[in-house]
């Protein structure tokens, strides 16, 4: 099985590596990431079967990493030293986790559990539930962009606007460029800061900072000009909200 | 340190006896005032004053002690019982003394008992007033002492809570690091274990040694820094800039470690790249200025009240500094990249010999 280790402490990775070497079964450690920002693209490109994911990391923590993992997803065994919130989440969603210092016995149990679940194909159910719960409560810290076959992680503030075209959602960056992302416009609208983002149309979600001008168009519709001179249509039924928002700014 | 309350007790006792003698003399003078007109007996007011005072005073205080044992003051009607019983005691004792005084007057040939009776009314009023005054004073003093004890115990409890506040996340991660080092670098594992033990011992002893020298507190903080550096060898850089002459300064124990822990928590744990923590001390006049800064993202708010919270390390540090140096002498400032403390510089040379080895010898 192909395994990826994610932990910001080198000693913790070193120990886990040594313990995995001692455990039975064929384990191939395909990579190690020292933070969440490195982990997401590595999971995307290396496609491991199993990820040991530390919760407390700078930048993107373990849960933030999970937010950015679109299915198909590897199985995840969370690792934490002591985090009451995390432990509660693991229990509620029946997720696999290990507490530090990890013991060989518990590590072996978790690996066996993973092997059994792989056979049953239901390893991802708890993770989906946790993701859904976080989608309802936690704001999104970062976004994943597809650039060619690679993944890039950006701050949502770097995006000028999102555009939905058929089933695909694109992020238009402030630095130029247009990239496919894995979130729907609904997901983005609910998980980005409502004070910073505005849905102006079925197909557009706009970064409020990028707005320059609102001009009347025809039969109650408007046109919105952005700071890079992009012109986008404002839907008739959203025009009132857009005007109210701009007056407030 | 234990002399102060005892001395205060003596002072209070002396004041009460003086007050009693003055009151007693007034009573005696009222009783025998008419007697002094024909031939003044100079010692009579003082003699009867002391006699009456000792009798009334001791009976009231004894009755009060008895009452406190059997009728605890927990409700208003219990307070009423105390008041009524004490007043009755005072009146009964006064009536007894009245009889004794009259008899003594006749024996000592100071005048006739019927003359004494004329002043009975005013004297009784004074005795009742005196009882109320004594009662109020002693009960108020009791309440004050209880309140002070309660405050003291809150502070002790806080310190106890602080020393239990060895962050479990830090502890478990350190144990994990030690477990990792045992396999690859046993000597380093030994070092980290010893440092963790020393740090833990220093924390446990903090309540026994409320004040230490800056040098001692720095040594303990260095233990913490060394452990964190084993966990984050690439990412954590700490520099300590404390002039040697300031290391004798008196500070509350566990002053710096919570601040550095805060800096590591908010710096390293939130920065993916390297993070530097700086500990600086500087003296301007009589004021010692301590800074703990980090290159992390900084405080979310510059509002002190938003950053300070109940039971936080930072709040606790400020409270203990205020306890040691007084509220007006202690200042906590938020910098964009850390905290700054100002408090009086007081070298603790006389204490050096006693506790210099607190960390080293433990």
Image (spheres, rainbow, N blue to C red):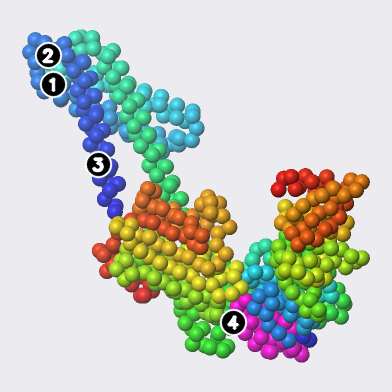
Residue A8 within the segment the image draws in magenta: yes
For the residues marked 2 and 4, what is the alpha-carbon distance in whole angstroms?
97 Å
Counting from the top left corner in percent of width and height, residue B95 is at 28, 19
Q: Residues within 10 Å of mark 3 (few under 14, many from 20)?
A: few
Circle 1: element type: helix
Residue B163 within the segment the image draws in magenta: no
- One can see residue B77 in this view: yes
- One can see residue A143 in this view: no
Q: Which residues are magenta?
A: A3-29
Which residue is the extreme one toward the left?
B39
Q: Nearer the viewer, mark 2 or mark 4?
A: 4
Residue in the foreground of this view, choosing between B54 and A241: A241
Q: Residues within 10 Å of mark 4 (few under 14, many from 20)?
A: many
Counting from the top left corner in percent of width and height, residue B297 is at 57, 64
Quarter holding the N terminus of chain B?
Answer: bottom left
Name the residue at 76% across, 90% down: A26
Counting from the top left corner in percent of width and height, residue B175 is at 56, 77
Name the residue at 56% across, 55% down: B301
List the residue tagged with mark 4.
A11
List the residue tagged with mark 2.
B36
Circle 2: element type: helix
Q: Which mark is residue B10?
A: 3
Q: Which mark is residue B44?
A: 1
Circle 3: element type: helix
Q: Residues within 10 Å of mark 2 (few under 14, many from 20)?
A: some
């Amino acid at each position: 099985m192909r395994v990826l280790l994610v932990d910001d402490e080198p000693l913790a990775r070193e120990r886990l590596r040594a313990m995995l070497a001692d455990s039975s079964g064929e384990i191939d450690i395909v990579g190690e990431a020292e933070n969440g920002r490195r982990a997401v693209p590595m999971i995307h490109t290396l496609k491991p079967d199993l990820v040991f994911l530390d919760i407390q990391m700078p930048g993107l923590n373990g849960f933030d990493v999970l937010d950015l993992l679109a299915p198909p997803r590897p199985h995840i065994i969370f690792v934490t030293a002591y985090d009451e919130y995390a432990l509660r989440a693991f229990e509620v969603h029946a997720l696999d986790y290990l507490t530090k210092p990890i013991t060989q016995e518990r590590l072996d149990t978790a690996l066996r559990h993973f092997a059994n679940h792989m056979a049953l194909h239901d390893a991802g159910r708890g993770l989906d539930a946790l993701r859904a719960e976080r989608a309802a409560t936690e704001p999104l810290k970062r976004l994943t962009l597809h650039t060619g076959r690679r993944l890039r992680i950006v701050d949502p503030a770097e995006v000028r606007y999102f555009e939905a075209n058929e089933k695909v959602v694109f992020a238009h960056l402030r630095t130029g460029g247009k990239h496919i992302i894995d979130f729907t416009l609904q997901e983005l609208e609910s998980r980005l800061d409502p004070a910073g983002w505005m849905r102006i149309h079925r197909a557009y979600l706009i970064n409020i900072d990028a707005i320059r001008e609102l001009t009347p168009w025809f039969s109650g519709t408007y046109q919105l000009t952005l700071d890079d001179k992009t012109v986008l249509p404002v839907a008739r039924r959203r025009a009132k909200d857009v005007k109210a928002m701009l007056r407030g700014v | 340190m234990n002399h102060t309350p005892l001395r205060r007790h003596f002072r209070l006792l002396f004041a009460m006896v003086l007050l009693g003698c003055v009151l007693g003399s007034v009573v005696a003078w009222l009783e025998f005032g008419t007697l002094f007109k024909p031939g003044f007996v100079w010692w009579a007011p003082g003699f009867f004053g002391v006699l009456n005072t000792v009798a009334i005073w001791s009976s009231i205080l004894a009755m009060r002690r008895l009452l406190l044992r059997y009728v605890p003051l927990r409700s208003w009607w219990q307070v009423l019982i105390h008041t009524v019983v004490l007043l009755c005691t005072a009146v009964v004792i006064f009536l007894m003394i009245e009889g004794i005084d009259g008899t003594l007057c006749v024996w000592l040939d100071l005048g006739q008992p019927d003359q004494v009776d004329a002043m009975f009314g005013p004297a009784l009023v004074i005795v009742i007033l005196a009882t109320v005054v004594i009662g109020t004073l002693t009960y108020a003093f009791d309440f004050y002492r209880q309140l002070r004890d309660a405050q003291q115990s809150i502070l002790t409890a806080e310190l106890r809570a602080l020393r239990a506040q060895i962050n479990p996340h830090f502890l478990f991660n350190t144990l994990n690091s030690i477990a990792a080092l045992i396999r690859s670098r046993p000597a380093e594992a030994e070092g980290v274990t010893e440092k963790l033990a020393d740090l833990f011992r220093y924390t446990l002893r903090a309540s026994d040694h409320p004040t230490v020298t800056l040098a001692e507190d720095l040594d303990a903080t260095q233990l913490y820094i060394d452990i964190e550096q084993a966990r984050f060898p690439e990412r954590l850089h700490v520099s300590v800039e404390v002039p040697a002459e300031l290391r004798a300064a008196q500070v509350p124990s566990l002053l710096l470690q919570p601040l550095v822990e805060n800096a590591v928590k908010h710096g390293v744990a939130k920065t993916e790249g390297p993070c530097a923590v700086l500990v600086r001390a500087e003296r301007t006049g009589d004021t010692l200025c301590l800074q703990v800064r980090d290159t992390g993202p900084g405080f979310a708010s510059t509002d002190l009240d938003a950053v300070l919270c109940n039971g936080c390390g930072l709040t606790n540090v400020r409270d203990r500094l205020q306890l040691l140096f007084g509220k007006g002498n202690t200042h906590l400032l938020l910098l964009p990249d850390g905290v700054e403390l100002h408090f009086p510089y007081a070298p603790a040379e006389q204490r050096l010999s006693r506790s210099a080895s607190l960390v080293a010898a433990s």
